[in-house]
Amino acid sequence: MLKRALAIISLLLIGYWIAQGLAGVPFGQDRMLVAQYYLDHVKEQTGAVNAVTAIVVNYRGFDTLGEVTVLFIASTGVGALLWRRKKQRTAKTEGSIVLTTGTRLLVPFVMLFGAYIFIHGHLTPGGGFPGGATIATAFLLLYMAFVQYEIPHKAFEKVEGAVGVSYVLVGLIGLAIGGYFLYDWIWQDWGFGVDNIGRLLSGGFIPIIYTIIGLKVGTELSGIIDNMLKEEVSE
Amino acid sequence: MISVYYFGAISLILIGLYAVLVKKNLLKMLIGLSIMETGVNLLLVSVGYVAGRSAPILSEGIGPNQAVDPIPQALVLTAIVIGVATTAMALSVAMILHEKYGTLNVEEIRRLRG
């Protein structure tokens, strides 16, 4: 009881402290400094309509590479923690008829929707991370509906490695052409899609990078699902 | 006077922190961590909000002066995925602990060690 009271008191103190800190940041007022520059120049500098994805891929592309690396390390960590010599799925109950029929019908469309989200990242809300998560939900559906289903491990590992390398490669090509890592040569040098802003074929290398991120996130989250659903079996 | 949006986000953070401090079940602590993370994300997004403006997608009718701050949204976008990955990792640690000790109670796990 004492512990709980102490916890509540400290929580109230922390809450008061955060609220005091936020008192200097009134809600809903314009305080943009860097962001105003981004918003003013996002169209001619990156060719993207969606300022959020332009920041994620162009202005903070190196940061995003770091975040993809964190995701990769977390996925590898799950694999390492749940590693056993002999492991397979031991699910016993098949999904209900509603789930299996729905899965058969919906899985292609869920994957298509995920691909739509990451290909249109520079135009609409979304991008590589939500698109990849959507694709992973398609595999989760398959896992839930069918007892024996497993993802194609060999292909997934290859895709995961290849897209990780190709992100760095895109950055290195930019380094070779423009002089710094992740230089957007498609937009800055070629001017590809200059009179096309707001349509699919524009946005410099944002669609390429986002396809890479989407595949990476999708395969990694599916791998995490696969690792967590498997159990050890005695030989 | 604190805004109701800040109030909601801060109270989510505090609820999550309470679960982490008080609960003994590992799964409940992890749920608390997830709630905390949601609160932090909401707080970041609401700091970036500007009254009367639209989402930072510069299409027809929305110029650079009619959009909210895009930077917190970009940060939160990636933070959500990282949060999911780290939660998955913490859950697999919990799975291994449960296999090894047969319980998820942190105090009992601590007592068994040694």
Image: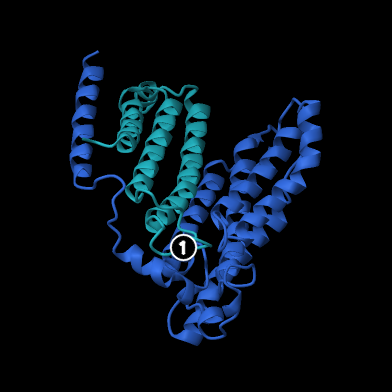
Q: Quadrant of residue A229?
A: top right
Q: Secondary structure at mark 1?
A: helix
Along the horizontal axis of the image, is B109 left or right of A225? left
Q: Which chain is cyan?
A: B
The vertical placement of B13 against A134, above or below, is: above
Return the residue at label 1.
Answer: A51
How far from the left and from the top, in percent, is residue A130? 56, 50
Residue B106's x, y, as percent? 38, 25
- Towards the viewer: A30 or A67: A30
Q: Quadrant of the N terminus of chain B?
A: top left
Residue B114 at least partly seen: no
Check the image and report above or below for A165 versus A102: below
* Residue A207 image point, x, y percent: 60, 67
Colour scheme used in the picture?
A: by chain
Quarter of the image for the C terminus of chain B: give it.
Answer: top left
Q: Which chain is blue?
A: A
Q: Residue at x 78, y 28 (%)?
A: A98
The image position of residue A19, as x and y in percent, is 22, 37
